Amino acid sequence: MIQLCKINEVSDNYFKWMQDSDLLKFTEARHLKHTRESLGEYIKTVNADPNSFLYGIFKDDEHIGNIKIGPVKNGYGSVGIIISGQYQGYGYGRSAIEKAITLHNISLTAGCYAANIPAINLFATAGFKYVGLKKKVETDVLMFIRV
């Protein structure tokens, strides 16, 4: 069982993930150098936005991932999720998405790079429907929605 908890600080696990180029290879975060200070500022920025929500995903007491919802507007929000590599493929991401939907009573949109097979599988098992493709110079982005 997992729990979602609002995060206010950078855990050691969170900092470690953000240094892992393999884990970040399908994220926009891969372009940045992450320090504890920059991650702390990101947390503060998201927490200051009343329409966005950043949660840590915890298995027992271990911080295994993060999920960001928002901005939320008119019952819709986008979702971004990162799960530590050793915990991917066990349903923790799907459970986190389900809990976030229940907590906020919203529909979610998501996007991922076409080569990001784990994210495509996550969104499919979490009930998202493929709605289109955004052509990008660097890589194509698949778009999903869950209503």
Image (spheres, rainbow, N blue to C red):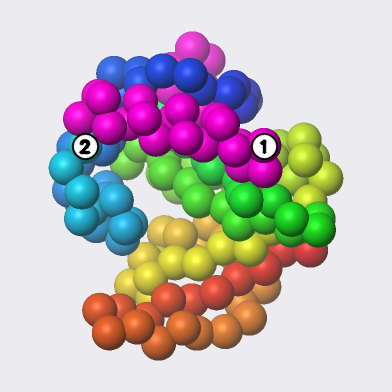
Q: Residues within 10 Å of mark 1 (few under 14, many from 20)?
A: few
Question: What numbered label is drawn on residue 140?
Answer: none
Depicted 61 relative to depicted 74: above or below: above
Depicted 107 relative to depicted 19: above or below: below
Q: Nearer the viewer, mark 1 or mark 2?
A: 1
Using the rendered view, name the quadrant where residue 3 is placed: top right
Using the rendered view, name the quadrant where residue 55 is placed: top right
Using the rendered view, name the quadrant where residue 91 is placed: top right
- Residue 126 visible: no
For mark 1, give the secondary structure.
Answer: loop
x 43%, y 22%: residue? 63
x 55%, y 30%: residue? 47
x 42%, y 76%: residue? 141
Q: Earlier in the sequence, mark 1 or mark 2?
A: 2
Quadrant (top left/top right/bottom left/bottom right) for the N terminus: top right
Q: Position of residue 139 (x, y in %)?
A: 30, 79
Which contiguous range is marked in magenta? 35-63
Residue type at mark 1: give it.
Pro
Q: Magenta includes 59? A: yes
Instruction: Please indicate whether residue 121 sits to the left or right of residue 84 in the image.
Output: right
Task: Kindly indicate whether the residue at mark 2 contacts the one at mark 1 (C-beta within 8 angstroms).
Answer: no
Q: Position of residue 31 (x, y in %)?
A: 20, 55
Q: Magenta includes 99? A: no
Q: Which residue is mark 1?
A: 50
Residue type at mark 2: give it.
His
x 81%, y 55%: residue? 75
Q: Position of residue 49 (x, y in %)?
A: 60, 38
Give the total number of marks visible in the rendering: 2
Give the Cα separation between the discs numbered 1 and 2: 24 Å
Q: Which residue is mark 2?
A: 34
